[in-house]
Image (tube, rainbow, N blue to C red):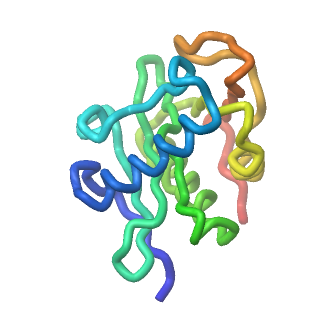
Amino acid sequence: MPIAIAAETPLQDDVRALIAELNKELLALTPPEFCFHMTSEQMATPATTLFVARDEGQAVACGALHRHEGGVGEVKRMYTRPSHRGRGTGGMIIAHIEALARQEGLTKLVLETGDRHPAAWAVYERAGFTRCGPVLDYPDSQWSVFYEKNLTAQPAVA
């Protein structure tokens, strides 16, 4: 059975467990003051849509679109369990986030990720994101890498 991706509530126990794994992994690589987490409760608002990837019903990956003023969407809480990495799941979630952002008329996607996450960089760069300076209200630091993608151009055909 292929991996299924859908918008879901972050307030499910298995999704909370996935977010806890993400937080643990990030805190092992980045000082806590430079980890910009959203809790499950913070994601359970109309400003955020969480996509969950499931393999035979089990939550294995996630990523969220968080909307900001001025037509800007932020990619948040991207995570794939180690057992499912290397299968393109992150790219599929990014595609869902981008499709929703375009559907809603957002003009730009931005994100902040860590300086020790080359696998994540590869996912974002394959999806057409380019590195940029600090975005939104994130501080410029050695621990952060920033990306952006203009959505006013037509989406690439795969």
Kindly identify the residue that appears in the image at 73 percent across and 31 percent down.
115
Viewer-proximal residue among 144 and 102: 144
Image location (x, y in percent) of residue 5: 43, 66
Image location (x, y in percent) of residue 131: 77, 29
- In the visual, does 84 lie left or right of 73? right
Where is residue 49, by image quadrant? top left
- In the visual, does 82 lie left or right of 141? left
* Depicted 47 relative to depicted 78: above or below: above
Viewer-proximal residue among 78 and 109: 78
Residue that sits furthest to the front in the current view:
28
Image location (x, y in percent) of residue 81: 53, 62
Viewer-proximal residue among 10 and 94: 10
* Depicted 127 relative to depicted 47: above or below: below
Kindly identify the residue that appears in the image at 23 percent across and 56 percent down.
12
Viewer-proximal residue among 2 and 77: 77
Question: How many badges with numbers are in the image?
Answer: 0
- In the visual, does 89 lie left or right of 52? right
Q: Which quarter of the figure is the C terminus placed in?
A: bottom right
Kindly identify the residue that appears in the image at 53 percent across and 57 percent down.
93
* Depicted 1 relative to depicted 129: above or below: below
Kindly identify the residue that appears in the image at 59 percent across and 64 percent down.
82
Where is residue 39, by image quadrant? top left
- In the visual, does 121 lie left or right of 55? right
* Depicted 85 relative to depicted 151: above or below: below
